[in-house]
Image (cartoon, rainbow, N blue to C red):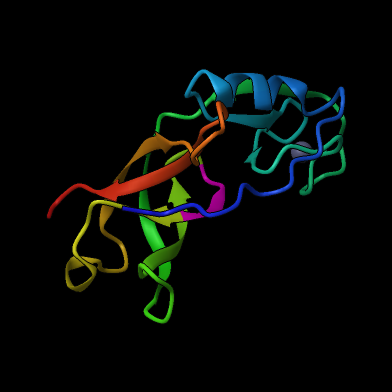
Amino acid sequence: MVNLKSEPKRQTTPDTRPYWDALAQRKLLLHRCQDCGKAHHYPRAHCPFCFGCNLDWEEASGRGSVYSYSVMHRADPPYVMAYIELEEGPVIMSNIVDTPFDKIRIGAPVTIDFISSPGSDSPIAVFTQNDC
Ligand SMILES: [Zn+2]
């Protein structure tokens, strides 16, 4: 279980408001560029691949795989930072939860979940490995 001691500082702009509103409802949104067709995460005003600004929101499936990870053994309690490759293409930084550290492996399928830090009503996206 991840123990969030402090909530990350969030900067909401008119461009990112839909993302944060969806996250509050336990949905992860991606931007998909209508010019080149690629999805990206985190939200921004221009496509990082072709610099187009014709972007649409879409809800992520919540499925992906472990791209890389690191166990923070010195934290109390220890936790796992990971890069998750979403099936839509973007690689996002997140946490792997509810999975024994010694069972985590690169390429393993994961599913999204959402957790909130104490005192916060805004969850963050985390992932659980499916085959443990
Ligand atoms: Zn593009």
| Residue at 42% from the left image edge and 69% from the top image edge | 68
| Residue at 50% from the left image edge and 41% from the top image edge | 117
Is 90 contained in the magenta span? yes
* Corner quadrant of residue 42: top right
If the image is split into quadrants, where does the C terminus sit?
A: bottom left
- The residue furthest front is 119
* Residue 30 coordinates in the image, percent (x, y): 61, 32
Identify the main secondary structure in magenta.
strand
**How many marks on residues?**
0
Is 93 contained in the magenta span? yes
* Residue 95 coordinates in the image, percent (x, y): 43, 55
Q: State which region is magenta.
A: 89-94
- The residue furthest left is 132
* Corner quadrant of residue 71: bottom left
* Residue 129 coordinates in the image, percent (x, y): 24, 52
* Corner quadrant of residue 22: top right
